Amino acid sequence: MAAEAINPQAQIEWGENQTPYSAQFDDFYYSTDSGLAEADYIFLQHNLIAERLSAMASSAQKSARLGSFCIAETGFGTGLNFLTTLLHWLQMAQVQSAPNLHFISFEKYPLSAEDLRQAHAAFPVLSELSDLLIERYPLRLPGWHDVWLFEGQVRLTLWFGDVLKGMPEFNLKVDAWYLDGFTPSRNPDMWQPELYKQMARLSHLETTFATFTAAGHVRRGLEAAGFDVKKDVGFGQKRELCFGKLLHERSYSPKWPWFSRVPPLQNASNLNVCVVGAGLSGAPVAYQLANMGMRVTVLDAQPEPDWEHPSHNAEQASANLAGAVHPLVTADWNLRSEFYLKGFETTLKWLQPWLEAGEVQGSLDGLMQLAVDQTQLQRLQDAFRRVGLPEDFAVWCDAEQASEMLGMKTDYAGAFFPKGGWIEPQSVVKKCLSHENITVHWQHSVEQLIQDEASSSLPPTWQILTDKQALKADVVVLCTGALSDDLNDQFGLPIRPVKGQVSHFSVEDQVELPKMAVTHKGYTCPCRLQQDKLTGKWIAGVTGATFEAPDRSFDMSDASHEENITQLTDALQVAPIEHLDLMQGKIGFRPTTPDHLPIVGAMADSAWVKEAYYSQSHTHAVFRYPSQKYQTGLFVSNGHGARGLMSVFLAAEMIAADILGSTQVLPMFLADACHPERFRVRFWRSAKRHSKKQG
């Protein structure tokens, strides 16, 4: 039996007036009379969108706080409701200050960009907004995708997948619901009591809703969940519609109290922040917080790098000449695939403008992943078959096609990622640390962190004691990497350093390199042309990298060079490479974790956690445990391993959102999977731990 598709796509036909028609649900996406008028009448007018946005703007003039308005929708479809709302928001923003808009929408069967364009063509007034949306329309892959418009004032969050699986992953308050989707009789899987319960969980007493249907079971379900339901004249051929607001707000326990979200810090935009570590994990955190107006001090034990010649920085953790940028593809599209897809999208959002401006070095014009063994081949083939990878994300290539694209012979098929490529990590670090709100102290080794006592009016602050001076900060973010054993151990971070050696190719070696970045058992990339300090040769490319735990020496070996070259020549038909004893390279240490996901977020209060959880039985009902208590102002971003370029920018946004208390950037199950306390929680709740205790 064929496996069920993980990522089903919309099957579109075109009916009267070029109105899109769903073959799956035997129904039109919107009224054949006027979809634009329908969206405005049902959803905007019955949720009082224009009036509420205007009231928020007027209130903001008095309080100097503009705020944000959140709309959630079931059934993104053609995006017509979103574009209609965006049009009203834009018209308002042109005459007065408008609150930020966060529009969340769930869609199990996403349309292609081409189908969106064809549907929008019937509404010329939307043409510019349609072009903007389609230009940034996300990859049609399962999970959470963010689209930012109008310099961050508008955020569109799309959940591609089942709405009843997506809604529990949100932890925010919605101001208005667009309860859309195909008619209940043709889409019964969505119109369930659980839908209305989740709506209520995500609502407050001012939250409104509107829907095109007045079906009895829909009204009763909404009323049972705490909504006041009223009826009005429907649109077009629909006799009646429903609208209303939440009457009874209920308290809800977090799904996992030990992973409950950290409270935001007071006066966050004026905080003094200390980031410990100026490498690839710390620099983006510093940049993100500095960009939000915070004053950031970065401490690093190493001397300032030679920014123009990364090959000279023998012990700089982020000084590899090139790193591969590509998503993680699995046949079952598991948790790690979803996390690294979100990380990949965030990486592109950060790096593409910098590349275009010449502010970082690299290329995101494509990467080839070769399936060099049967396991990789089967995984990639299953992913293309089951997940339905879209062509703007990945293209299957046989060996002949791969050879042509790489410009050299290979016997292996694989996946071409059009948006992948390579980046010089140190150029990213340099760009981030050049922000005007950042001060960097090199050769400052942090010896101790001490949290001062809070007063009745002020939260606690941190003393950071280094070998050079003592500093104070409201917030500390630990980005210490692989080799900071003292700090990692002090805060219980299970970081395991894994040594890796990369080999460099020089122009003088006359080694043929592929036209683009390629991964095999390792990776091979071109790099920015630069002169090697020891040999005087001009470095043009890199290949690697070995995995040599638990070795911690910075000594390179001919054996590791040979391993790297063997991986390359097994994958590509490269002429024999001589004089390995003269080859140069780079040693680095990957900070890895037991579950191969980074550690990102707020640090728990270790003494409180021990008393509240670990000294208690693990068998109580979850709601009986208190919500997590955190050490005020202490965060971490570490354990990014070999995929740091696909996670460090996302981690920076996660930490900034927690400090500010802004809307989450990941679904809860992915944020929980990166939580700093997850390893101790798993041990506490595991049968293995309790069997040991009993023994």
Image (cartoon, grey):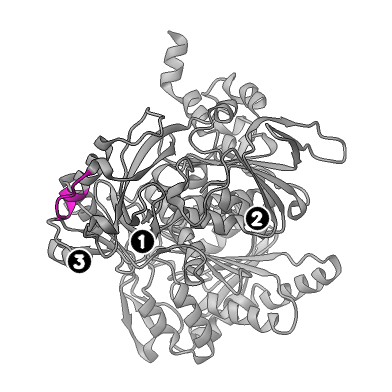
The residue at the point 67 percent across, 26 percent down is 608
**Residue 255 coordinates in the image, percent (x, y):** 55, 40
Q: Earlier in the sequence, mark 1 or mark 3?
A: 3
Magenta stretch containing residue 398, yes or no? no
Magenta stretch containing residue 573, yes or no? yes
The residue at the point 37 percent across, 33 percent down is 555
Q: Tell which tag, 1 or 3, sits nearer the viewer.
A: 3
**Residue 246 coordinates in the image, percent (x, y):** 67, 59
Left or right of 673: which side holds 628?
Answer: right
Instruction: Say what secondary structure mark 2 lies in.
Output: loop
Give how far apart the Cα atoms at labels 3 and 2 are.
47 Å
**Residue 132: mark in rendering:** none
Instruction: Say what secondary structure mark 3 lies in.
Output: loop
Amino acid type of the residue tagged 2 in the rendering: Ser
Instruction: Say what secondary structure mark 1 lies in.
Output: strand
Q: Residue under label 2, please give it.
A: 662
Amino acid type of the residue tagged 3 in the rendering: Gly
Q: Earlier in the sequence, mark 1 or mark 2?
A: 1
Amino acid type of the residue tagged 1 in the rendering: Gly
Give how far apart the Cα atoms at labels 1 and 3 are.
16 Å
**Residue 407: mark in rendering:** 3
